[in-house]
Each structure stands twice: as structure tokens, then as C-alpha cells.
Image (cartoon, rainbow, N blue to C red):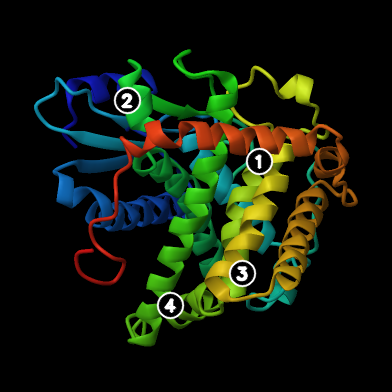
Amino acid sequence: MHLPSDLQATLDAKGGLELPSHPDAWTRHLISQVASGLEQYRKRIEQLYFDGIGVKLHCGIYNESEARAFAALSSQVQPDKVAFIGISYGFVFNAACFATMMLSRSDMLKEVGSPEKEPQPNPISHMPSSMADSPFHPAQPACPIRKAFAAFLTVRFVESVFMHEVSHLVRGHLGLIQSLGGLNWSEGDDMPGHLAALTKQALEFDADGGAIEESFNYLFSVQHAFSIGHFKNADPAALRALEILYADGPSAAKYSFMGMYLPLRMFEHLHWERDLQNGSSHPHPPIRMLYLMFIYSLALVEALDLDMDSAKITVGEWARECEANYMALHGEKIDPSGIRSAWFSPEGGTYIDDIHNELERLAPELARHVIHMSVKPGGGSS
């Protein structure tokens, strides 16, 4: 992969693209599946947004054990215009552990394959926010369908953060940062002080909304591929796993929701206060998870024609399943105190209003940097 010097320097500073090797063939397979999935997403997004404006999109997994990601644009002085999305090895490893641990238990995701083939649950005493540098490793489900599904779900989890970074690029966030002298948008650590804290938080919420939109677009493209027999020659277990993952709209959306919700849940913020939120570059998980439920409800109404009450009930059930699974991995009962603290906070509504007002204020400036879709999904030029 050839990158402009400024992007290469950024990537090298974050650990480069040479990843740890694993003696475990299953772990190597999962990481390979993620790399292949990212390349599919990259090609799709490049065709939809970047081919028409002469920008090359690259992406890769970089060697950082913390669960992070970033998006970057090469500077105007570079001869070639390149965008780059990096997903940390730590995030990929977390996704692989999460997905495979759930599918290796008989009490989770029972709609997939034959859960009775899995061993009795073995609670985890402590789950670190970064599993890449811990004794954890991906589990291997006994049921072939659940094993295949675990690999696909790992990729779906990584898809969520990839689409979030895409949104930072195409919604004008990176262009705004670049106009102020910055280069990249980093998740999981503070960015240079080119933007006020509330502005950064607002753009994170905006990127979450964009990620959901892009994920639904991709979901519909996969469902179309099913309808024309694209996967008919797949291994039977893999084909059944894909059918469960993508065939039904609301169910497919649930796995996308899990991919965005569970990584936030890992940071175990069990309380939200506006005073603690102020000054942070990113919205704290409880309020972000709560807002995620809201925008997914809207997406189900707009994309799948559910009425709002049904959409809210559906997303609420997804959140409860995520919470129950997360706590069950620890051998504990469900504890939604984080989201509840945001829901019942007298400052929560005012904070979200401030976020919306900030996005409205930013709209004219962001509009100058938006990268519009030049090709319709599944069609020709727009």
C-alpha cells in the first residue's frame, strides 16, 4: 500500500500495518475474514463516493492494542489526494472475542444454529476494555453454523466502526478539521484542539447516524445479492449463517446495532453527568448508547416501514439483549444503570438539544466539505 508521506507518518506513529502473528488458526482466520470484509467495504465506499472526485480510499488494520480507529485525508500540498481509514488491531480482536464468546454459549443468540451443542456457560471474572494484550482469545463454537456466524458477526462488528469513520470523511468532518489545520479524526483519544469539545461531541453523534445509514445501505445490497443467487455455492453452514445474518430486515439490523452498542458497553461507564461530559472529545457511553437507541428507532421507521411504537419496542429489546449478554458473560444479572442514569438525568434532554443546535450551527461550514454520493447503491451515476 502506497500512501502520501503525511498519511504514512500518521500510520507509522500509530503502529503501522504489521500485525502480531497467532499460533491459533481460528484467530488467524477471523482476522483474515475481517481484512477481507474491510476490503469489500472499501471498494464499495470508494465507488459510491470517491471515484468521481479523484480521491483514492485506503484502509487497514494497524498495530495498536487499544480499541481505536481513525480517519485521515492527505493534505492539500500532496500530489495525490488519498483518504485512509484505520481500525486498530485491538478493536478487531475485541470484536472477535465478543462475537465468538457469545456464539460459544448455549444461552446467547439462540436463533443461530444449534445452541445446545455449545458447552455450559463459564463466567468471566474480568473483561478488560482491550483484550488484545490480555489472556483472552477468540472462542470456537462447536456448532458449524454458529462457528460460521461468529466469523461473519465479527466482520459486522468491525463494519460498524468502519462506517462511522466513513461518515467522518463524507459528512465533511475531516474537511472541516483540515481547514483548521488538522489531519485526522481519531477515536479513543483526544484530537488536537482545533474544535470545541461540544463540536467534537456533536460530530461523533453525526457520524453514528451516518454509520447506521451506510450499514442499512450495505444490508440492502447484500439482500439483493441473495435475491439473485450470489451466495448459492457457499458452504451450507456458511450459507445458513449468512441467511440468518442478512435475510430478515429487522433481525439483520439487530446485529448491526449490537456492533455499535457492545463496544461502547465495554467501557463500563455506569453513570452519566453533564459536568463529567463537558470537556471530553467524545460523548460518554451511556448517553451515546441511549442516543443510538433513538436513531436506530428512526432508522427502522424510515428504512423498514415500522411504526414508531414498534420500532422503539424492537430497539429496546435489542438493548436489553445486549445488556443481558454482556452481564451474563461476567456471570452477573442485567445492570442497565448507565443508560438509566442518562435517561433520567435532568440534564440529558438539554444536552441532546445542545448537540442538535451545534450541528445546525455547523451545517453551512460542513456543507462546504461534504463528499456527495456520485453513484447510487446498486445503480449508476446519480
Residue located 23% across and 63% down the image? 382
In the displayed structure image, the side of residue 50 where residue 260 appears, left or right: right
Which amino acid, mark 2? Leu
Residue indicated by mark 2 = 11
Point out the frontmost of discs 3 and 2. 3
Q: Quadrant of residue 214?
A: bottom left
Kind of residue indicated by mark 4: Gln
- Residue depicted at 43% across the width and 72% down the height: 220
Real-space CA distance between mark 2 and mark 4, rounded to the nearest whole angstrom:
35 Å
Q: In this view, does 377 lie above or below 278?
A: below
Q: What is the number of callouts on the image?
A: 4
Task: Please tell me in which quadrant of the rendered image residue 106 appears.
Answer: bottom right
- Whichever of callouts 4 and 3 sits on the residue coming sooner in the sequence is 4
Residue kind at label 3, given as amino acid type: Val
Residue 115 or residue 374, whichever sits in front: 374
Numbered disc 1: secondary structure: helix
Q: What element carries label 4?
A: helix
Q: As displayed, is residue 194 above or below residue 95?
A: above
Instruction: Say what secondary structure mark 3 lies in.
Output: helix
Residue 203: tell me if it is visible: no
Left or right for 121, reference 210: right
Disc 1: which residue: 264
Q: Earlier in the sequence, mark 2 or mark 4?
A: 2
Is 316 on the left or on the right of 179, as rendered? right
Which residue position is annotated with label 4? 223
Can you tell which mark lies on residue 301? 3
